[in-house]
């Protein structure tokens, strides 16, 4: 009896977007590494539970400052497919070359 090679199907990892080829039986694989698996599980946990009390308080502070959710700031935001942050404010220019604190 000869071993048969299974036909591989194209899949895409949900976190990093990398393409991989695997047998149809492995279509449940959604991450390529432990790092991506950690991000994926954190994202799913955030979706299931919603925001915690501290994150809700932070949202209220930002809204009281006049920022609009999903326009001026984003919650549970994935940066560069690696880091899941509670709040992302695109206009804050985090990591600026001056190195000053933008939010006190």
Image (cartoon, helix red, strand yellow):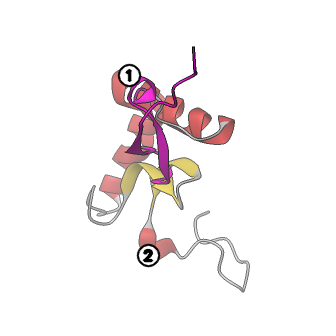
- Magenta region, residue range: 1-28
Q: Could you tell me which quadrant the C terminus lies in?
A: bottom right
Tell me the tag on residue 102.
none
Q: Mark yes or no: residue 77 visible.
A: yes
What residue does disc 2 label? Answer: 91
Q: Could you tell me which quadrant the N terminus lies in?
A: top right
Q: Residue furthest top?
A: 1
First in residue order: circle 1 vs circle 2: 1
Task: State the CA–CA distance, disc 1 to disc 2.
Answer: 28 Å
Residue 60 image position (x, y, % from top left): 35, 45
Residue depicted at x 67% and y 71%: 101
Residue 49 image position (x, y, % from top left): 38, 22
Q: Residue furthest bottom?
A: 98
The local crowd at label 1, few if under 14, some if 14 to 19, many if 20 or more residues have their Cα within 10 Å, is few
Q: Secondary structure at mark 2?
A: helix
What residue does disc 1 label? Answer: 49
Q: Please determine whether, in this image, residue 95 is positioned above or below residue 89.
A: below
Give whichever of 39, 11 is nearer the camera.
11
Residue 19 lies within the magenta run: yes
């Amino acid at each position: 009896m000869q071993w048969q090679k299974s036909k591989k199907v194209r899949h895409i990892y949900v976190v990093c977007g990398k393409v991989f080829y695997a047998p149809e039986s492995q279509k449940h694989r959604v991450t390529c590494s432990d790092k991506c698996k950690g991000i994926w599980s954190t994202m799913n946990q955030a979706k299931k539970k919603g925001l915690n009390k501290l994150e809700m308080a932070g949202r209220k502070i930002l809204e009281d400052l006049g920022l609009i959710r999903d326009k001026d700031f984003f919650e549970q935001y994935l940066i560069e497919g690696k880091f899941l942050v509670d709040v992302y404010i695109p206009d804050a220019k985090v990591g600026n070359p001056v190195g000053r604190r933008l939010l006190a």
